[in-house]
Every structure is written in C-alpha cells, then in structure tokens.
Amino acid sequence: MRVLVVGGGAREHAIARTLSIAGAELVHIAPHTNPGIARLARATARSEITDADAVVTFAERQEIDYAVIGPEAALAAGVTDALRAAEISVVGPSASGARIESSKLFCRELLARNGVGGQPRFEAPRSLEEVDALAERFGGPFVVKPSGLTAGKGVWVQGSDFIEAKEGAAYAKSLLVQGQRVLLEEKLVGEEFSLMAFVTDSGIYPMPAVQDFKRALEGDKGGNTGGMGAYSQRDHLLPFLPAADRDAAVEIIRQSVAALRTEGIEYRGILYGGFMLTAQGPKLVEFNARFGDPESINVLSLYEEGNFDELMFGVASGRVDPNLVRFRLRSTVLKYIVPPGYGDKPHAGGILRLDEPAIEAAGVHVYFGSVEEVGPSAMQLGSGRGIALVGEASAIHEAGTRVETALAHVQGEFYVRHDIGTNEDLARRREHMRQILSPGAKPSPLPLSVAPAAAPPSSAASPDRFL
C-alpha cells in the first residue's frame, strides 16, 4: 500500500522505517527534510504539518491508501478531519478526539463525567482571584499544568520546579494572564511509565510498557524536555511494574475510549497514557493522542517484521486483526543525542560525523530528528532532539551498553544522558517503588514485575513469544 507519513522527527522516521520493512510504499510531508525518511520515501513535500489543505492536496496527488499522522499539532489543527473529508483513511483521531491531549481540562472533565478511575484530584481556576484559594485547598504538593499543548515542557511540579505554594500560584496566574486555561493537580508520588495502545472500532490493542526520561540532566535533574530517552523490558513490563498494574492501566485506557464514544467521539489512532504507579495503583498523569516520542521508537524497534502496514491500515479503517499486534521479547534502551544546552538554551549548528554502518553493527538503530544532512556521514544539529540511538538486547542494561558503545562512532559536540538504562538507575527506581509500596522494606535485587514461571509475558495475549 502507499502510505503518507505526516511529520519529520525521529518518531516519524521510526514509523516510516517500520512501514518500509513491511513493504509499504512511502510518501512524506513535513516542514523540513528528514535524512532517514528521505532515503525511504518515493516522494516528499515541504509544508507546515498544520496546513490541512496542503496535506490533502499532496495526499490526493500521490493517490495514497491511508495516512499516519505523527505530531499532535497536526491532529489539533484538524488535518485528520480534512483527510477523512477527502475520503482518505487516517491513523489519528479527529480534532475533537485529539482534545484528550490538546486540552487537559477537556480530558479531566470528560473522564470525571464518565467515572473513569485512576484520576488525581484537580482544580481549574478561571480567575486570578481563585488561584491562591485553590492552591491552598490542596493542603499538600501540587502540579501546575497549562491546559493546551506544551511539547512536554510547560508543567511545573512542586519540589522540582518550585518550592513554595505561592510560587506555583504565581506561575498559574502568569498562564491565566496570557489567556490560557490552567489546571492545578495533586502531585502524584511513584514511578512514571508510558503505555500506548492501537485504538479503533474493533477494540484497543496495548503495546509494551516504556519508561521515559523527561528531565534534561542525569539523575532526573534540570528542566522538563520532550524526552531524553527511554527503555523497555524484555517481558513488556518494567522492573517496578507488575502485570496486574499494567493491566489496570490498560483498563483506564479502555474506559477512556468508552467515555469518548459515549459522548459521540469516534477514535481511530494511537492513545498513549502517561501514568504514575503509586501506592494506590496506576494514576493517569495525562493522555496523548498519538505515538509517543521517544517511547514509540523503542516499541516500533521491536515490532515483528512484515505486517505493520496491514496493522496500521486496520487502525485507520476500523478493524484490527489482533494477531498483527506482535512485538519481540527483547529489551530496548534509547538515548537522544541533543545539542549542548538542550532543554534551556540549546546551541544549534554543531556538526556531527557518524559511522552508521558501525553503529548498526553494534546492534543499535539510528533514527534522525532535528538534523540536516550537510555531507557524507555529516549531520548538523538543530535546536531540538537530534538523533535517537536505540539498542536492543536481552537485558535492559545490555541494551544500554550497546548504545554507549555506539556513541564512540559519533564525533562532534553534543549532549546525551548516559544514566538511562544503567543497572544503577534501574535499581534506584525499583527500590523507590518498593519503599512506596512497603516503607522500610529491605532492598532486593529482584524486580517488582517478577511473575510465576508459567505466566505469559503479557496478559494481553496468549503465552507465546508475542504480546
């Protein structure tokens, strides 16, 4: 089939690569050239991804079978609606459905109206005068969230981004003054994880769980970013995430899709839940209406070769064969190469020279994001996340070691978080969760996700080698 991929980041490169492996014929539209996608696509166009008319015109000219939309901005701008009006199937919700991401207030109120579990307490002040009283009402740490799209960088967490409640209140007021809606939510304590699912008329189909690293600096210090990297575990759980809690998160996704449908909103696309595993089970931090970046790059690197094109067409057209939801039982670690100062004041323009054959020979995949190809094996870094390196192995730390080995084949000035996927970081997260669940418990080398030997790797499917 001929498929249009909308968007030009490393996430879209991963989507394009997985479709290409399955034999799809690719065409691509984005504001800039992605070096990796350019090698795979038979035709490309340069346009803003929010320009629905330009996207539809290109799609019709290329006579595509369906489209896959990567970035949230295109979904919020109604590009999906325009394509469907032109009778083109799309992997991606309508602008109405995408409000589950583009309006955090809509999401919380939707789920509250429909009794969906796993929600934190929240308030949505409408005036400057309300902010102080509502912040005081929490009686404990809280989080300030702009209601609209922020690329993962607008959330302030008490204890990390501000200390005193009055500082958080001042930030909330500054957002209201700018004309934005804002949410105050209780601060959840635990370990975050991401769970994506293919969603269409025939049901929801979960993918392996992933943990991403939002903070810019090692040890989870520094400001929030779009994501510095991520890892996944061989059994599709996580060191701190048992199958029962993963299944509870899947149920929250299922209830949320049902809530959308109850209110007359069709959803065909990806629904990605950001969750916090707490002492009371998983709680929803936020929903995203598309593949996560970086999480989808980890997950798509594990997709069984040969059927992704058919799977995505099933999502777009309304019926998925569950036998196509197939992921290898391997661990992955992704680390993003970014410009120095990324997350605060990125120094764009640096030239990287990379030996892609040597990197691939080390068992590491290369996905291009905010870079421009300026010569043989030479890439110029933009201001965003530049290159994603994804290692695959049996154990998480082994996959991380492969990425570290591959970094020797990248020359130039850049920054990367070396602590992602190390045994030390994994142990710290595991013990953090253990203490939340059982304060005072003795440290243990065993992951909290250990299951009986006879248990399947995932309760989402039969006990064979696929999820």
Image: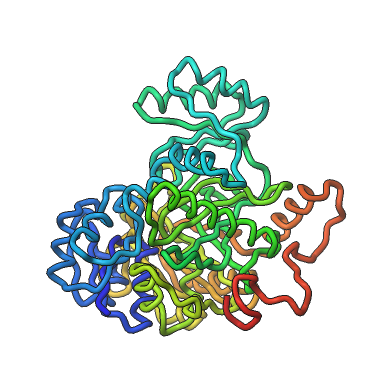
Q: Which image quarter is the C terminus in?
A: bottom right
The residue under the point 57% across, 79% down is 466
Residue 345 percent across, percent down from the top left: 40, 43
Residue 355 percent across, percent down from the top left: 40, 76
Q: Is residue 441 visible?
A: yes
- Reply above or below: 239 against 105: below
- Reply above or below: 281 against 150: below
The residue under the point 57% across, 17% down is 133
Left or right of residue 457: residue 384: left
In the figure, residue 202 lies in which quadrant?
bottom left
Q: Is residue 373 visible?
A: no
Report the front residue among 82 and 344: 82
The residue under the point 15% across, 57% down is 54
In the figure, residue 10 lies in which quadrant?
bottom left
Q: Residue furthest top?
A: 129
Q: Which image quarter is the N terminus in?
A: bottom left
The residue under the point 42% across, 24% down is 174
In the figure, residue 444 lies in which quadrant?
bottom right
Total marks placed: 0
Residue 208 percent across, percent down from the top left: 56, 68
- Reply above or below: 170 against 255: above
Report the front residue among 267 and 144: 267
Residue 331 percent across, percent down from the top left: 60, 73
